[in-house]
Amino acid sequence: MALDERKGVWKSGKGKGRHTPKGRQLDDQAHDEVRALLGDAPRRRDLLIEFLHKVQDTYGHISAAHIRALAEELRTGQAEIYEVASFYAHFDVVREDETPPPALTIRVCDSLSCELAGAEALLAALEDGMDPAQVRVLRAPCMGRCDTAPVLEIGHNHIDQATPEKVQDAIAKGDTHAHIPAYQTLADYRATGGYETLQSLRATGDWEVVQDKVLEAGLRGLGGAGFPSGKKWGFVRMNEGPRYLAVNGDEGEPGTFKDRYYLERTPHLMLEGMLIAAWAVEAERCFIYMRDEYPAVLHILATEIAALETAGIVPEGYIELRRGAGAYICGEESAMIESIEGNRGLPRHRPPFVAQVGIFNRPTLVHNVETLHWVARICREGPEVLNSTEKNGRKGLRSYSVSGRVRNPGVHLLPAGSTIMDIIDAAGGMSDGHSFKAYQPGGPSSGLLPASMSDIPLDFDTLQPHGTFIGSAAVVVLSDKDSAKAAALNMLRFFEDESCGQCTPCRVGCEKAVKLMQADRWDTGLLEELSTAMVDASICGLGQAAPNPIRSVIKHFPDEV
Ligand SMILES: Cc1cc2nc3c(=O)[nH]c(=O)nc-3n(C[C@H](O)[C@H](O)[C@H](O)COP(=O)(O)O)c2cc1C
Ligand code: SF4
Ligand code: FES
Protein backbone atom coordinates (compact mmCIF):
# COMPACT_ATOMS: atom_id res chain seq x y z
CA MET A 1 0.00 0.00 0.00
CA ALA A 2 1.30 3.45 -0.92
CA LEU A 3 2.08 5.83 1.93
CA ASP A 4 -0.62 8.33 0.80
CA GLU A 5 -3.42 5.74 1.06
CA ARG A 6 -2.52 5.01 4.68
CA LYS A 7 -2.78 8.65 5.81
CA GLY A 8 -6.42 8.31 6.82
CA VAL A 9 -5.47 5.93 9.59
CA TRP A 10 -3.55 8.65 11.39
CA LYS A 11 -5.45 11.77 10.47
CA SER A 12 -9.09 12.82 10.51
CA GLY A 13 -10.83 13.39 7.17
CA LYS A 14 -10.12 17.12 7.11
CA GLY A 15 -6.44 16.50 7.45
CA LYS A 16 -6.28 17.97 10.98
CA GLY A 17 -4.42 15.90 13.57
CA ARG A 18 -5.35 15.74 17.28
CA HIS A 19 -2.81 17.64 19.37
CA THR A 20 -3.76 16.24 22.77
CA PRO A 21 -5.15 13.05 24.18
CA LYS A 22 -8.95 12.97 24.40
CA GLY A 23 -10.60 14.21 27.55
CA ARG A 24 -10.12 17.13 29.94
CA GLN A 25 -6.76 18.84 29.53
CA LEU A 26 -4.47 19.94 32.30
CA ASP A 27 -5.00 23.63 33.01
CA ASP A 28 -1.67 25.30 33.78
CA GLN A 29 -3.09 27.80 36.24
CA ALA A 30 -5.08 25.18 38.18
CA HIS A 31 -2.03 22.95 38.22
CA ASP A 32 0.13 25.74 39.65
CA GLU A 33 -2.52 26.45 42.28
CA VAL A 34 -2.73 22.83 43.35
CA ARG A 35 1.05 22.49 43.46
CA ALA A 36 1.29 25.59 45.62
CA LEU A 37 -1.37 24.25 47.99
CA LEU A 38 0.25 20.84 48.31
CA GLY A 39 3.72 22.34 48.77
CA ASP A 40 6.20 19.63 49.61
CA ALA A 41 3.58 17.26 51.06
CA PRO A 42 4.23 13.72 49.88
CA ARG A 43 1.92 12.92 46.97
CA ARG A 44 0.33 10.02 48.83
CA ARG A 45 -3.02 8.78 47.56
CA ASP A 46 -4.28 8.29 51.13
CA LEU A 47 -3.91 12.04 51.70
CA LEU A 48 -6.45 12.83 48.97
CA ILE A 49 -9.15 14.05 51.39
CA GLU A 50 -6.64 16.34 53.12
CA PHE A 51 -5.70 17.76 49.69
CA LEU A 52 -9.33 18.22 48.72
CA HIS A 53 -9.82 20.20 51.95
CA LYS A 54 -6.96 22.50 50.97
CA VAL A 55 -8.60 23.27 47.63
CA GLN A 56 -12.09 23.66 49.15
CA ASP A 57 -10.80 25.90 51.97
CA THR A 58 -8.89 28.15 49.58
CA TYR A 59 -11.28 28.43 46.65
CA GLY A 60 -14.61 27.70 48.33
CA HIS A 61 -15.20 24.84 45.90
CA ILE A 62 -13.36 22.20 43.89
CA SER A 63 -13.37 22.89 40.17
CA ALA A 64 -13.04 20.34 37.39
CA ALA A 65 -9.67 21.90 36.56
CA HIS A 66 -8.52 21.35 40.16
CA ILE A 67 -9.64 17.73 40.00
CA ARG A 68 -7.63 17.28 36.81
CA ALA A 69 -4.60 18.91 38.47
CA LEU A 70 -4.92 16.74 41.60
CA ALA A 71 -5.10 13.66 39.40
CA GLU A 72 -1.88 14.80 37.73
CA GLU A 73 -0.11 15.34 41.06
CA LEU A 74 -1.27 12.02 42.53
CA ARG A 75 -0.72 10.14 39.28
CA THR A 76 -4.23 8.79 39.37
CA GLY A 77 -7.43 9.10 37.36
CA GLN A 78 -9.80 12.06 37.52
CA ALA A 79 -12.71 9.69 38.05
CA GLU A 80 -11.12 8.44 41.25
CA ILE A 81 -10.71 11.98 42.59
CA TYR A 82 -14.23 12.86 41.52
CA GLU A 83 -15.86 9.87 43.17
CA VAL A 84 -14.16 10.68 46.47
CA ALA A 85 -14.83 14.43 46.36
CA SER A 86 -18.49 13.96 45.46
CA PHE A 87 -19.06 11.48 48.30
CA TYR A 88 -18.53 14.03 51.08
CA ALA A 89 -21.04 16.77 51.94
CA HIS A 90 -18.37 19.36 52.71
CA PHE A 91 -16.85 19.35 49.23
CA ASP A 92 -18.47 21.39 46.48
CA VAL A 93 -17.49 19.92 43.16
CA VAL A 94 -18.15 22.41 40.36
CA ARG A 95 -18.01 21.44 36.69
CA GLU A 96 -17.07 23.84 33.88
CA ASP A 97 -20.72 24.69 33.13
CA GLU A 98 -21.74 25.19 36.76
CA THR A 99 -21.65 28.25 39.02
CA PRO A 100 -19.52 28.03 42.15
CA PRO A 101 -21.33 28.50 45.48
CA PRO A 102 -21.27 31.96 47.09
CA ALA A 103 -18.39 32.84 49.39
CA LEU A 104 -20.32 32.19 52.60
CA THR A 105 -22.19 29.04 53.60
CA ILE A 106 -24.53 28.71 56.56
CA ARG A 107 -25.36 25.16 57.59
CA VAL A 108 -28.42 24.88 59.79
CA CYS A 109 -28.74 21.71 61.84
CA ASP A 110 -32.07 20.01 61.23
CA SER A 111 -31.60 16.90 63.38
CA LEU A 112 -34.01 16.08 66.19
CA SER A 113 -32.92 18.30 69.10
CA CYS A 114 -32.54 21.29 66.80
CA GLU A 115 -35.87 20.57 65.13
CA LEU A 116 -37.51 20.54 68.59
CA ALA A 117 -35.86 23.91 69.26
CA GLY A 118 -37.21 25.54 66.11
CA ALA A 119 -34.70 24.76 63.35
CA GLU A 120 -37.38 24.86 60.64
CA ALA A 121 -38.46 28.40 61.50
CA LEU A 122 -34.82 29.46 61.70
CA LEU A 123 -34.12 27.97 58.28
CA ALA A 124 -37.11 29.70 56.76
CA ALA A 125 -36.12 33.06 58.26
CA LEU A 126 -32.56 32.72 56.99
CA GLU A 127 -33.61 31.60 53.52
CA ASP A 128 -35.89 34.65 53.29
CA GLY A 129 -33.46 37.13 54.75
CA MET A 130 -30.25 36.33 52.85
CA ASP A 131 -29.11 37.31 49.39
CA PRO A 132 -28.49 33.92 47.72
CA ALA A 133 -25.73 35.48 45.61
CA GLN A 134 -23.79 36.23 48.79
CA VAL A 135 -24.80 33.54 51.25
CA ARG A 136 -25.92 29.98 50.80
CA VAL A 137 -28.18 28.42 53.45
CA LEU A 138 -28.05 24.63 53.68
CA ARG A 139 -29.58 22.00 55.90
CA ALA A 140 -27.07 19.86 57.75
CA PRO A 141 -27.16 16.97 60.17
CA CYS A 142 -26.31 17.13 63.89
CA MET A 143 -23.27 19.24 64.72
CA GLY A 144 -22.73 17.74 68.17
CA ARG A 145 -24.00 20.82 70.01
CA CYS A 146 -27.52 19.59 70.72
CA ASP A 147 -27.38 21.05 74.25
CA THR A 148 -27.44 24.55 72.74
CA ALA A 149 -30.05 23.92 70.03
CA PRO A 150 -30.87 25.31 67.57
CA VAL A 151 -27.39 25.44 66.14
CA LEU A 152 -25.90 26.58 62.88
CA GLU A 153 -22.45 26.95 61.41
CA ILE A 154 -21.52 30.09 59.53
CA GLY A 155 -18.25 29.42 57.76
CA HIS A 156 -16.59 27.52 60.60
CA ASN A 157 -18.14 29.53 63.41
CA HIS A 158 -20.82 27.63 65.30
CA ILE A 159 -23.63 29.73 66.67
CA ASP A 160 -25.44 28.28 69.64
CA GLN A 161 -29.09 29.04 70.34
CA ALA A 162 -29.01 30.62 66.93
CA THR A 163 -31.28 33.45 65.78
CA PRO A 164 -31.29 35.44 62.53
CA GLU A 165 -30.01 38.43 64.55
CA LYS A 166 -26.95 36.49 65.78
CA VAL A 167 -26.27 35.49 62.18
CA GLN A 168 -26.48 39.08 60.91
CA ASP A 169 -24.18 40.13 63.69
CA ALA A 170 -21.58 37.45 62.87
CA ILE A 171 -21.69 38.37 59.17
CA ALA A 172 -21.27 42.07 59.97
CA LYS A 173 -18.23 41.32 62.11
CA GLY A 174 -16.77 38.81 59.66
CA ASP A 175 -16.88 36.30 62.52
CA THR A 176 -16.77 33.11 60.48
CA HIS A 177 -13.94 31.20 62.16
CA ALA A 178 -13.98 28.58 64.88
CA HIS A 179 -13.80 29.88 68.46
CA ILE A 180 -11.24 27.93 70.47
CA PRO A 181 -12.34 27.28 74.06
CA ALA A 182 -9.95 27.37 77.03
CA TYR A 183 -8.69 23.84 77.57
CA GLN A 184 -6.03 21.90 79.48
CA THR A 185 -2.78 22.22 77.49
CA LEU A 186 0.14 19.81 77.57
CA ALA A 187 1.92 21.93 80.19
CA ASP A 188 -1.21 22.03 82.39
CA TYR A 189 -1.72 18.31 82.00
CA ARG A 190 1.87 17.45 82.82
CA ALA A 191 1.73 19.68 85.88
CA THR A 192 -0.90 17.28 87.24
CA GLY A 193 1.20 14.18 86.54
CA GLY A 194 0.02 13.71 82.96
CA TYR A 195 2.04 11.26 80.81
CA GLU A 196 3.89 9.84 83.84
CA THR A 197 1.78 6.67 83.53
CA LEU A 198 2.64 6.34 79.85
CA GLN A 199 6.35 6.92 80.47
CA SER A 200 6.52 4.35 83.25
CA LEU A 201 4.58 1.79 81.20
CA ARG A 202 6.90 2.34 78.27
CA ALA A 203 9.90 1.85 80.59
CA THR A 204 8.85 -1.21 82.57
CA GLY A 205 5.19 -1.98 81.93
CA ASP A 206 3.60 -5.31 81.05
CA TRP A 207 0.78 -4.89 78.54
CA GLU A 208 -1.15 -7.84 79.94
CA VAL A 209 -1.27 -6.24 83.37
CA VAL A 210 -2.76 -3.14 81.78
CA GLN A 211 -5.19 -5.25 79.78
CA ASP A 212 -6.35 -6.94 83.00
CA LYS A 213 -6.90 -3.55 84.62
CA VAL A 214 -8.98 -2.37 81.69
CA LEU A 215 -11.02 -5.59 81.79
CA GLU A 216 -11.43 -5.35 85.55
CA ALA A 217 -12.70 -1.80 85.20
CA GLY A 218 -15.39 -3.15 82.90
CA LEU A 219 -14.55 -0.65 80.15
CA ARG A 220 -16.57 -1.28 77.00
CA GLY A 221 -16.49 0.47 73.64
CA LEU A 222 -18.20 3.83 74.05
CA GLY A 223 -18.60 4.37 70.31
CA GLY A 224 -21.77 2.37 70.80
CA ALA A 225 -21.00 -1.28 70.18
CA GLY A 226 -19.90 -1.92 73.77
CA PHE A 227 -17.22 -4.47 72.99
CA PRO A 228 -14.93 -5.08 76.02
CA SER A 229 -11.93 -2.88 75.30
CA GLY A 230 -9.23 -5.09 76.85
CA LYS A 231 -10.39 -8.08 74.80
CA LYS A 232 -10.05 -6.10 71.61
CA TRP A 233 -6.37 -5.42 72.38
CA GLY A 234 -5.83 -9.18 72.59
CA PHE A 235 -7.48 -9.74 69.20
CA VAL A 236 -5.38 -7.08 67.54
CA ARG A 237 -2.17 -8.47 69.06
CA MET A 238 -3.01 -11.95 67.75
CA ASN A 239 -2.30 -10.61 64.26
CA GLU A 240 1.25 -10.07 63.18
CA GLY A 241 2.52 -6.45 62.93
CA PRO A 242 3.00 -3.82 61.81
CA ARG A 243 -0.20 -2.75 63.51
CA TYR A 244 -2.01 0.58 63.58
CA LEU A 245 -4.33 2.37 65.94
CA ALA A 246 -7.21 4.57 64.82
CA VAL A 247 -9.19 6.93 67.01
CA ASN A 248 -12.80 7.29 65.99
CA GLY A 249 -13.70 10.94 66.48
CA ASP A 250 -16.53 11.01 63.97
CA GLU A 251 -19.27 11.39 66.60
CA GLY A 252 -22.05 11.69 64.04
CA GLU A 253 -24.93 9.94 65.80
CA PRO A 254 -27.41 12.80 66.28
CA GLY A 255 -27.74 13.78 69.91
CA THR A 256 -24.17 12.73 70.80
CA PHE A 257 -21.65 15.33 71.93
CA LYS A 258 -19.67 13.68 74.73
CA ASP A 259 -16.47 13.25 72.67
CA ARG A 260 -16.44 16.93 71.80
CA TYR A 261 -17.15 17.76 75.44
CA TYR A 262 -14.05 15.88 76.63
CA LEU A 263 -11.78 16.98 73.79
CA GLU A 264 -12.61 20.64 74.26
CA ARG A 265 -11.68 20.37 77.94
CA THR A 266 -9.12 17.63 78.57
CA PRO A 267 -7.74 16.52 75.18
CA HIS A 268 -4.66 14.94 76.74
CA LEU A 269 -6.65 12.29 78.58
CA MET A 270 -7.69 10.91 75.19
CA LEU A 271 -4.17 11.39 73.78
CA GLU A 272 -2.47 9.63 76.69
CA GLY A 273 -5.08 6.84 76.58
CA MET A 274 -4.41 6.48 72.87
CA LEU A 275 -0.65 6.26 73.41
CA ILE A 276 -1.13 3.66 76.18
CA ALA A 277 -3.34 1.55 73.90
CA ALA A 278 -0.85 2.03 71.05
CA TRP A 279 1.93 0.85 73.36
CA ALA A 280 -0.15 -2.16 74.42
CA VAL A 281 -0.72 -3.35 70.84
CA GLU A 282 2.67 -2.11 69.60
CA ALA A 283 1.06 0.18 67.04
CA GLU A 284 3.48 1.59 64.53
CA ARG A 285 1.37 4.68 63.96
CA CYS A 286 -1.80 6.32 65.25
CA PHE A 287 -4.47 7.97 63.15
CA ILE A 288 -7.04 10.30 64.64
CA TYR A 289 -10.12 10.66 62.45
CA MET A 290 -11.90 13.82 63.54
CA ARG A 291 -15.16 15.05 62.09
CA ASP A 292 -15.06 18.30 60.14
CA GLU A 293 -17.96 19.62 62.21
CA TYR A 294 -15.52 20.07 65.12
CA PRO A 295 -13.10 22.73 63.82
CA ALA A 296 -12.14 23.82 67.35
CA VAL A 297 -11.23 20.25 68.29
CA LEU A 298 -9.21 19.90 65.07
CA HIS A 299 -7.29 23.02 66.04
CA ILE A 300 -6.73 21.83 69.62
CA LEU A 301 -5.52 18.42 68.48
CA ALA A 302 -3.17 19.80 65.83
CA THR A 303 -1.65 22.15 68.44
CA GLU A 304 -1.33 19.51 71.15
CA ILE A 305 0.06 16.82 68.84
CA ALA A 306 2.77 19.29 67.80
CA ALA A 307 3.43 19.95 71.50
CA LEU A 308 3.78 16.20 72.14
CA GLU A 309 6.31 15.99 69.31
CA THR A 310 8.28 18.96 70.64
CA ALA A 311 8.29 17.42 74.12
CA GLY A 312 9.68 14.20 72.66
CA ILE A 313 6.70 12.14 73.89
CA VAL A 314 6.04 10.95 70.35
CA PRO A 315 8.28 11.01 67.28
CA GLU A 316 7.31 13.44 64.56
CA GLY A 317 4.58 12.00 62.35
CA TYR A 318 3.69 9.20 64.77
CA ILE A 319 0.19 10.65 65.16
CA GLU A 320 -1.63 11.55 61.95
CA LEU A 321 -4.63 13.81 62.34
CA ARG A 322 -7.23 13.27 59.64
CA ARG A 323 -10.15 15.55 58.99
CA GLY A 324 -13.50 14.08 57.99
CA ALA A 325 -15.59 15.85 55.39
CA GLY A 326 -19.21 15.56 56.43
CA ALA A 327 -20.30 11.91 56.23
CA TYR A 328 -21.98 10.18 59.18
CA ILE A 329 -21.21 6.76 57.76
CA CYS A 330 -17.49 7.39 58.30
CA GLY A 331 -18.12 6.73 62.00
CA GLU A 332 -18.63 3.08 61.14
CA GLU A 333 -15.15 1.76 61.70
CA SER A 334 -14.50 0.11 58.35
CA ALA A 335 -15.90 3.14 56.49
CA MET A 336 -13.63 5.32 58.64
CA ILE A 337 -10.69 3.22 57.55
CA GLU A 338 -11.66 3.63 53.91
CA SER A 339 -11.79 7.37 54.49
CA ILE A 340 -8.39 7.37 56.20
CA GLU A 341 -7.07 5.63 53.11
CA GLY A 342 -8.45 8.51 51.04
CA ASN A 343 -11.50 6.73 49.64
CA ARG A 344 -15.27 7.04 49.76
CA GLY A 345 -16.54 5.93 53.15
CA LEU A 346 -18.15 2.67 52.12
CA PRO A 347 -18.34 0.12 54.96
CA ARG A 348 -16.52 -3.12 54.25
CA HIS A 349 -17.91 -6.62 54.45
CA ARG A 350 -16.80 -8.61 57.51
CA PRO A 351 -14.96 -10.85 58.10
CA PRO A 352 -12.14 -10.01 57.98
CA PHE A 353 -12.53 -7.66 60.95
CA VAL A 354 -10.51 -4.47 61.18
CA ALA A 355 -8.53 -6.01 64.05
CA GLN A 356 -7.19 -8.37 61.37
CA VAL A 357 -7.29 -6.30 58.18
CA GLY A 358 -7.59 -2.57 58.85
CA ILE A 359 -5.74 0.50 57.64
CA PHE A 360 -3.55 -0.36 54.64
CA ASN A 361 -4.55 -3.99 55.28
CA ARG A 362 -2.75 -4.02 58.62
CA PRO A 363 -4.28 -5.14 61.95
CA THR A 364 -5.87 -2.03 63.42
CA LEU A 365 -7.13 -1.20 66.89
CA VAL A 366 -10.08 1.18 66.60
CA HIS A 367 -11.31 3.05 69.64
CA ASN A 368 -13.81 5.76 70.29
CA VAL A 369 -12.50 9.02 71.80
CA GLU A 370 -14.22 8.54 75.14
CA THR A 371 -13.06 4.93 75.45
CA LEU A 372 -9.47 6.17 75.32
CA HIS A 373 -10.21 8.96 77.79
CA TRP A 374 -11.16 6.21 80.27
CA VAL A 375 -8.11 4.08 79.41
CA ALA A 376 -5.92 6.93 80.66
CA ARG A 377 -7.98 7.36 83.80
CA ILE A 378 -8.08 3.63 84.58
CA CYS A 379 -4.31 3.37 84.23
CA ARG A 380 -3.77 6.35 86.48
CA GLU A 381 -6.57 6.01 89.03
CA GLY A 382 -7.13 2.25 88.93
CA PRO A 383 -10.11 0.17 87.75
CA GLU A 384 -12.12 1.57 90.68
CA VAL A 385 -12.58 4.81 88.79
CA LEU A 386 -15.27 2.90 86.90
CA ASN A 387 -16.10 -0.29 88.75
CA SER A 388 -16.66 1.17 92.20
CA THR A 389 -19.92 2.81 91.10
CA GLU A 390 -22.95 0.56 91.27
CA LYS A 391 -26.57 1.32 90.66
CA ASN A 392 -29.57 -0.82 89.77
CA GLY A 393 -27.31 -3.85 89.46
CA ARG A 394 -25.07 -2.13 86.90
CA LYS A 395 -21.43 -1.15 87.41
CA GLY A 396 -19.62 1.85 86.00
CA LEU A 397 -20.24 5.35 84.77
CA ARG A 398 -21.79 6.67 81.61
CA SER A 399 -21.45 10.05 79.90
CA TYR A 400 -24.99 10.73 78.78
CA SER A 401 -25.36 13.47 76.16
CA VAL A 402 -28.72 14.91 77.16
CA SER A 403 -30.81 17.27 75.05
CA GLY A 404 -34.40 18.03 74.20
CA ARG A 405 -37.01 19.20 76.69
CA VAL A 406 -34.90 19.42 79.84
CA ARG A 407 -33.79 22.46 81.82
CA ASN A 408 -30.05 21.81 81.75
CA PRO A 409 -29.07 19.88 78.67
CA GLY A 410 -25.43 18.83 78.47
CA VAL A 411 -23.10 15.92 79.18
CA HIS A 412 -24.03 14.33 82.49
CA LEU A 413 -21.63 11.76 83.94
CA LEU A 414 -23.84 9.40 85.93
CA PRO A 415 -23.87 5.80 87.12
CA ALA A 416 -24.30 3.42 84.17
CA GLY A 417 -27.43 2.04 85.84
CA SER A 418 -29.25 5.37 85.65
CA THR A 419 -32.83 5.40 84.41
CA ILE A 420 -34.31 8.13 82.26
CA MET A 421 -35.83 9.66 85.41
CA ASP A 422 -32.35 9.93 86.99
CA ILE A 423 -31.08 11.53 83.81
CA ILE A 424 -33.93 14.04 83.60
CA ASP A 425 -33.30 14.84 87.27
CA ALA A 426 -29.60 15.39 86.65
CA ALA A 427 -30.53 17.66 83.76
CA GLY A 428 -32.55 19.89 86.07
CA GLY A 429 -35.96 18.35 85.33
CA MET A 430 -38.28 18.94 82.41
CA SER A 431 -38.33 22.36 80.74
CA ASP A 432 -41.03 24.68 82.03
CA GLY A 433 -44.42 23.88 80.59
CA HIS A 434 -43.39 20.46 79.30
CA SER A 435 -44.31 17.07 80.68
CA PHE A 436 -42.34 13.94 79.91
CA LYS A 437 -43.69 11.86 77.04
CA ALA A 438 -40.91 9.86 75.35
CA TYR A 439 -37.17 9.50 74.99
CA GLN A 440 -34.53 8.44 72.56
CA PRO A 441 -32.09 6.37 74.65
CA GLY A 442 -29.11 6.21 72.29
CA GLY A 443 -29.35 8.19 69.09
CA PRO A 444 -31.83 7.73 66.24
CA SER A 445 -30.48 4.20 65.71
CA SER A 446 -32.13 3.31 69.02
CA GLY A 447 -35.61 4.66 68.22
CA LEU A 448 -38.01 5.97 70.88
CA LEU A 449 -39.32 4.66 74.19
CA PRO A 450 -42.44 5.94 75.99
CA ALA A 451 -42.36 7.68 79.38
CA SER A 452 -44.06 4.62 80.87
CA MET A 453 -40.81 2.67 80.38
CA SER A 454 -38.92 4.86 82.77
CA ASP A 455 -37.40 2.32 85.16
CA ILE A 456 -34.90 0.66 82.80
CA PRO A 457 -31.22 1.24 83.58
CA LEU A 458 -29.79 2.85 80.44
CA ASP A 459 -26.70 0.72 79.96
CA PHE A 460 -25.25 -1.85 77.57
CA ASP A 461 -27.37 -5.05 77.44
CA THR A 462 -30.31 -3.68 79.46
CA LEU A 463 -32.25 -2.27 76.52
CA GLN A 464 -31.95 -5.20 74.11
CA PRO A 465 -34.98 -7.01 75.60
CA HIS A 466 -36.98 -3.91 74.69
CA GLY A 467 -35.79 -3.93 71.09
CA THR A 468 -33.33 -1.09 71.46
CA PHE A 469 -29.84 -0.26 72.79
CA ILE A 470 -27.88 2.44 74.54
CA GLY A 471 -25.44 3.07 71.67
CA SER A 472 -23.51 6.27 72.30
CA ALA A 473 -25.92 7.30 75.11
CA ALA A 474 -27.41 10.18 73.12
CA VAL A 475 -30.53 10.83 75.15
CA VAL A 476 -33.17 13.14 73.68
CA VAL A 477 -36.18 13.89 75.87
CA LEU A 478 -39.55 14.56 74.22
CA SER A 479 -42.57 16.17 75.87
CA ASP A 480 -46.34 16.32 75.49
CA LYS A 481 -45.73 19.15 72.99
CA ASP A 482 -43.86 16.81 70.63
CA SER A 483 -44.94 14.21 68.14
CA ALA A 484 -43.28 10.79 68.27
CA LYS A 485 -44.29 10.28 64.66
CA ALA A 486 -42.58 13.48 63.55
CA ALA A 487 -39.48 12.56 65.57
CA ALA A 488 -39.28 9.19 63.82
CA LEU A 489 -39.60 10.88 60.43
CA ASN A 490 -36.77 13.23 61.35
CA MET A 491 -34.60 10.21 62.22
CA LEU A 492 -35.38 8.38 58.96
CA ARG A 493 -34.66 11.51 56.93
CA PHE A 494 -31.26 11.56 58.55
CA PHE A 495 -30.61 7.92 57.60
CA GLU A 496 -31.87 8.55 54.07
CA ASP A 497 -29.37 11.39 53.67
CA GLU A 498 -26.50 9.52 55.24
CA SER A 499 -26.90 6.04 53.73
CA CYS A 500 -23.75 5.42 51.70
CA GLY A 501 -25.93 3.76 49.10
CA GLN A 502 -23.91 0.65 48.46
CA CYS A 503 -26.66 -1.78 49.43
CA THR A 504 -30.16 -1.57 48.02
CA PRO A 505 -32.19 -2.44 51.16
CA CYS A 506 -30.68 0.52 52.98
CA ARG A 507 -30.44 3.00 50.10
CA VAL A 508 -33.92 2.37 48.72
CA GLY A 509 -35.41 1.28 52.05
CA CYS A 510 -34.65 4.58 53.81
CA GLU A 511 -36.05 6.55 50.89
CA LYS A 512 -39.27 4.52 50.71
CA ALA A 513 -39.66 4.63 54.49
CA VAL A 514 -39.50 8.43 54.45
CA LYS A 515 -42.20 8.52 51.74
CA LEU A 516 -44.46 6.13 53.68
CA MET A 517 -43.91 7.98 56.95
CA GLN A 518 -45.06 11.28 55.46
CA ALA A 519 -48.58 9.90 55.05
CA ASP A 520 -51.26 10.94 57.56
CA ARG A 521 -51.82 7.28 58.39
CA TRP A 522 -48.87 4.94 58.22
CA ASP A 523 -49.17 1.73 56.23
CA THR A 524 -47.77 -0.21 59.17
CA GLY A 525 -47.84 -3.58 57.40
CA LEU A 526 -45.75 -2.30 54.53
CA LEU A 527 -43.40 -0.40 56.85
CA GLU A 528 -42.88 -3.57 58.87
CA GLU A 529 -42.11 -5.56 55.73
CA LEU A 530 -39.65 -2.92 54.61
CA SER A 531 -38.05 -2.88 58.06
CA THR A 532 -37.50 -6.63 57.98
CA ALA A 533 -35.79 -6.42 54.59
CA MET A 534 -33.53 -3.60 55.82
CA VAL A 535 -32.55 -5.36 59.04
CA ASP A 536 -31.91 -8.68 57.31
CA ALA A 537 -30.09 -7.54 54.23
CA SER A 538 -28.10 -4.38 55.00
CA ILE A 539 -24.34 -4.60 55.17
CA CYS A 540 -23.73 -2.35 58.14
CA GLY A 541 -25.30 -1.02 61.30
CA LEU A 542 -26.82 2.04 59.61
CA GLY A 543 -29.26 0.06 57.48
CA GLN A 544 -29.76 -2.56 60.19
CA ALA A 545 -30.74 -0.01 62.85
CA ALA A 546 -32.55 2.53 60.66
CA PRO A 547 -35.94 0.77 61.11
CA ASN A 548 -35.76 1.12 64.92
CA PRO A 549 -37.54 4.49 65.01
CA ILE A 550 -40.29 3.09 62.75
CA ARG A 551 -40.83 -0.04 64.77
CA SER A 552 -40.67 1.66 68.15
CA VAL A 553 -43.22 4.29 67.17
CA ILE A 554 -45.60 1.66 65.76
CA LYS A 555 -45.21 -0.32 68.99
CA HIS A 556 -45.32 2.40 71.62
CA PHE A 557 -47.26 5.22 69.96
CA PRO A 558 -49.89 3.45 67.84
CA ASP A 559 -52.37 6.31 68.31
CA GLU A 560 -50.11 8.68 66.43
CA VAL A 561 -49.69 6.59 63.31
C1 LIG B 1 -23.43 3.61 61.28
C2 LIG B 1 -22.43 3.59 62.39
C3 LIG B 1 -21.90 4.80 62.85
C4 LIG B 1 -20.96 4.80 63.87
N1 LIG B 1 -20.46 6.00 64.30
C5 LIG B 1 -19.52 6.02 65.27
C6 LIG B 1 -18.94 7.25 65.70
O1 LIG B 1 -19.31 8.32 65.21
N2 LIG B 1 -17.97 7.21 66.65
C7 LIG B 1 -17.55 6.02 67.20
O2 LIG B 1 -16.66 6.03 68.04
N3 LIG B 1 -18.08 4.86 66.82
C8 LIG B 1 -19.04 4.82 65.87
N4 LIG B 1 -19.54 3.62 65.45
C9 LIG B 1 -19.00 2.39 66.07
C10 LIG B 1 -17.70 1.99 65.38
O3 LIG B 1 -18.00 1.20 64.25
C11 LIG B 1 -16.78 1.17 66.31
O4 LIG B 1 -17.52 0.17 66.91
C12 LIG B 1 -16.11 1.99 67.39
O5 LIG B 1 -15.46 3.10 66.85
C13 LIG B 1 -15.09 1.13 68.13
O6 LIG B 1 -14.51 1.82 69.22
P1 LIG B 1 -14.90 1.45 70.73
O7 LIG B 1 -14.73 -0.03 70.88
O8 LIG B 1 -13.95 2.22 71.56
O9 LIG B 1 -16.32 1.87 70.90
C14 LIG B 1 -20.52 3.58 64.44
C15 LIG B 1 -21.05 2.38 63.98
C16 LIG B 1 -22.01 2.38 62.98
C17 LIG B 1 -22.56 1.08 62.51
S1 SF4 C 1 -26.36 -0.49 55.27
FE1 SF4 C 1 -26.55 1.54 54.29
S2 SF4 C 1 -24.83 2.71 55.06
FE2 SF4 C 1 -24.40 0.55 55.52
S3 SF4 C 1 -23.22 -0.18 53.76
FE3 SF4 C 1 -25.35 -0.56 53.26
S4 SF4 C 1 -26.01 1.27 52.12
FE4 SF4 C 1 -24.11 1.79 53.17
S1 FES D 1 -26.55 19.95 66.98
FE1 FES D 1 -28.57 19.92 66.18
S2 FES D 1 -29.32 18.01 66.83
FE2 FES D 1 -27.28 17.95 67.48
Image: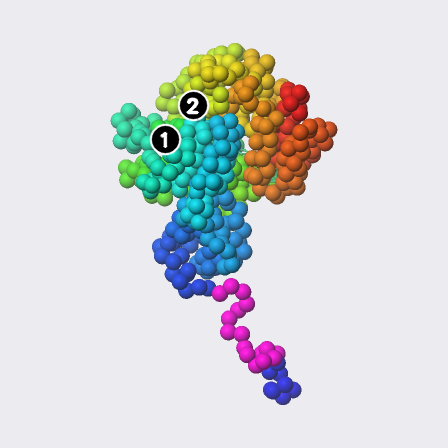
Residue that mark 2 sits on: 410
Looking at marks 2 and 1 on the same chain, the residue that comes earlier in the sequence is marked by: 1
Q: Disc 1 on helix, strand or loop?
A: loop
State which quarter of the image contains the N terminus. Answer: bottom right
Is residue 69 something that shows in the picture? Answer: yes
Q: Nearer the viewer, mark 2 or mark 1?
A: 2
Residue that mark 1 sits on: 264
Q: Which mark is residue 493?
A: none
State which quarter of the image contains the C terminus. Answer: top right
Residue span colored magenta: 9-25
Callout 1 crowding tier (Cα within 10 Å): few <14, some 14–19, many ≥20: many
- The location of residue 489, given as percent across then percent down, is 60, 31
Mark 1 close to ligand 3, CB under 8 Å: no
Q: Is residue 288 above or below residue 3?
A: above
- The location of residue 222, given as percent across then percent down, is 49, 27
Name which residue lies at 67% across and 29% down.
520
Name which residue lies at 55% across and 18% down.
480
- The location of residue 185, given as percent across then percent down, is 30, 31
Q: Disc 2 on helix, strand or loop?
A: strand
- The location of residue 236, given as percent across then percent down, is 50, 34
**In which quarter of the view is residue 204 placed?**
top left
Q: Main secondary structure of the magenta part?
A: loop
Q: Residue furthest bottom?
A: 2
Residue 19 among magenta residues = yes
